[in-house]
Image (spheres, rainbow, N blue to C red):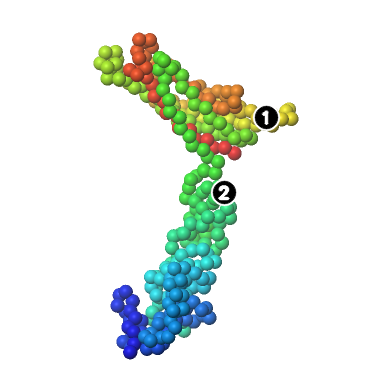
Amino acid sequence: MSYDITKTDGTKIYGDAGLPEGETDSIVYKESNINGGLMMIGKLVPEYGTDQSNNFLRLLENFSNDIFPDDPVTGMIFYKNDEQSLFVCTDEDSNWKEEGKSQREPEWTKLLAIQFQKPIPPAEPINGDLFFDQEDKKLYIYDSSVEAYVLIGPANYKNKKEISFFGTTSRAQTNFHSQINFDIGTTNLVTARIVASEKMSDDYIATHSGGRRPECSAWIYRLLVNNYKISDSESSLYVSKIIGNPNFELIGKTEHNVSEWTVTPTINTSNQLVLSCFGLGTDSAEIRPEDDHVEWEIDIDIVKV
C-alpha cells in the first residue's frame, strides 16, 4: 500500500500512485549534497524516529542554511543564515520539466527585515531592505533605482533631545522658570515653542471679566548655547554661554494684559539655560489664583554637536 501525500490545495506530491510502502523521499533539498530538508516517510518504514524528529527541528528553524532549497514548495519559509533574513517561496516552478529546463528555478521573495548595525549598512542589499543605524538612530530603506540606502527618518536624531515643561503664573506666583541642562563640551541649538493661556473660573467670568475672553499667546524662541571648558583653568570647569542674539518670534497674541507677558532666557550659576516666563491675567490683588491664572507649556528641541 502507499501513502497519498497532498498539499493544502489537494495537489498530490507523488501522483495517484502515492509514496510507495517502505520508502522514504527527501524533499526541499534534492539536487545538493546537503543532508537536510524534510523526509517523506512511507508506510511501514522501520526506525523512522530520526527522520521524524529531524523534520520537526527543520520546520522549527525554517530550514536555516546558506543555500536556498532546490526543491521548495510555494509558501515555504526559509531562513538564510548569511543574510540573517527570512524568504518566502512565491513560485516553486513546478513546470520546469515541461518547459525543458535542466533544473528548477524557484522564486524567493525576501520578507521585511530590519538589519541593526553600526554604522556600516549590510552589503549586497535588495530593493526594500531596511537598515537601522544604531549609532545615528536613523532608519534607511534600500532603493534599487538609485542603488543606495535612502533615509526614512528622523531627519536629525543622533544628538537631538526633546523635553517639555508645564507651569502656571498668577498674582501668587508671577514667574515660571524652566531649567535646561547641557552636556559638557557641546554646542546646542535650542528651539522652544511656548504657549500661554489664561484660565478663568466660571465665578470670575461672571463677576470680573467684563465680558472679555481669556487671553492667550504663543512664541518660538531659537538660541545657540555653547558649553565649553574654561581655557585658563587647569581644572575641568565648564561654562555655558548664549551665543549671538536669540531669535524671538511672536506667533500670535490677544490684545489686553497679554501685552505684558514675557519670556526671558538667561544662564544661571549652574550653567543651565533658564527660560523665565511672566504673565498675569489681571493686575487686581483681590483675585484668587484659582480664579484667574496663566498656564504655560514649553516644548523644547535641542540639537547638539
Q: Is residue 20 above or below residue 143?
A: below
Q: Give the residue pinned by disc 2.
A: 135
In whole angstroms, how far apart are the C-alphas of marks 2 and 1? 28 Å
| Residue kind at label 2, given as amino acid type | Glu
Q: Is residue 62 above or below residue 181?
A: below
Q: Is residue 272 visible?
A: yes
Q: Residue 223 occupies which quadrant of the picture?
A: top right
Which residue is located at x 69 percent, y 32 percent?
236
Which residue is located at x 73 percent, y 27 percent?
232
Q: Pointers 2 and 1 in contact (CB under 8 A)?
A: no
Helix, strand or loop at label 1? It is loop
Helix, strand or loop at label 2? It is loop
* Residue closer to the observer: 106 or 76: 76
Q: Which mark is residue 237?
A: 1
Q: Residue 257 occupies which quadrant of the picture?
A: top left
Q: Quadrant of the N terminus?
A: bottom left
Q: Which mark is residue 274?
A: none
